[in-house]
Amino acid sequence: MSVQPEIVVIGSLNADLVQNVDRLPKPGETVVGGNLETFSGGKGANQAYAAGRMGARVRMIGQVGSDSLASLLLDSLRSAGVNTDSVGAAEMSTGAAVILVLPDGENLIVISPGANATVTPALAAEKLGGLGERAFVLSQLEIPTESVRESLAVAKGRGATTILDPAPARALPGEVLRNVDFLTPNETETAALLGEPGLALDTDSDLETAARRILALGPGTAVLKLGARGCLIVSERDSLRVPGFKVVPVDTTAAGDVFNAAFATGLAEGRTLEAAARFANAAAALSVTRPGAQNSVPSRRQVDRFLKEPGG
């Protein structure tokens, strides 16, 4: 029986420090908020955790700090079966996001990169040294861009399949995108990649045109994540729309991360592109029906059952 290809996630590990407030303080003012809650997060860690929950063979590459938050993040990954041997420790604080949540659900976020900033190109290349050619490498943009560029180049050089989630949204140089097999932007990230923040993506024609423009930047395939509308997959020769699922959303946090993890898992299992995208749409849909980031990730059994239900 053949061993399933390894999914390697290189990216950020953050502790999310969340507090509910009635209103934001004015300069120099102190207000009383709700209980401070700490959750495991970071786009890289979220994707590794979700892939583990999907049943994939997963290894996480990244950096935590030398504080108590590091254990929280590592324990969470291990609980999902993720191999954390390639997560190092830097003599500084663990990456963190301080999040203030207002009564209407609107939030304000301040990110401290912390140890994530110590994922250097040299470290990325070293940790990817034993990569197999059947592997899948997932990356995002919460570690230094030059390290993302190096990890993608190393992965492609070893014959691995590369998947880049271009978030947080920004423009990227061609030298990064040319080493990407699957680029998975949402609508905001699509506009940022094209340098047009106000870009209209209302119609199928708009989406198709935008995807073709993204392909011209260098990636092999563009997978536009469209939330409840599913996704659009465009390569040089083909275009495929994969519909989403109707659910009642509670919290969309980390839905994109769940999509990427499930998409990579589907491909690693040998599914067709359409089947992998449908699996990813289902996993992401389930994730928005519950609050939080990693704690919103469904299990493999839950996704499989959801797909067997009427309308699934």
Image: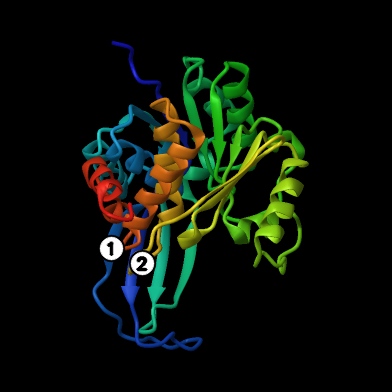
Image position, residue 66 (x, y; %): 35, 42
Q: Which mark is residue 230?
A: none
How many labels sit on residues? 2
Residue under the image location 53 percent in, 51 percent down: 231
Q: Position of residue 151 (x, y in %)?
A: 58, 29
Numbered circle sitting on residue 290: 1
Q: Is residue 41 above or below residue 203?
A: above
Residue 45 pos. (x, y %): 39, 43
Marks 2 and 1 in Cβ contact (< 8 Å): yes
Q: Residue at x 40, y 63 (%)?
A: 252
State the separation of the CA atoms marked 2 and 1: 6 Å
Residue sitting nearer the eye, 122 or 142: 142
* Residue at x-position 39% and y-position 41%: 262
On screen, residue 6 versus residue 286, left or right, reads right
Q: In this orientation, does residue 6 appear?
A: yes
Between discs 2 and 1, the one toward the N terminus:
2
Structural crowding at the residue carrying mark 2, measured as other residues with C-alpha within 10 Å and reported as few (<14), some (14–19) or many (≥20): some
Identify the residue shown where x is 52% and y is 21%.
126
Q: Identify residue type, mark 1.
A: Arg
Q: Position of residue 310 (x, y in %)?
A: 27, 54
Q: Secondary structure beneath disc 2?
A: loop
40 relative to 122 in the view: left or right: left
Amino acid at circle 2: Asp
Q: Nearer the viewer, residue 104 or 245?
A: 245
| Nearest the eye: 16 or 229 | 229
Tell me the residue that label 2 is attached to: 251
User: Which residue is nearer to you in this view: 92 or 176?
Assistant: 176
Q: Secondary structure at mark 1?
A: loop
Q: Quadrant of residue 221?
A: top right
Choose top left, top right, bottom left or bottom right for residue 182: top right
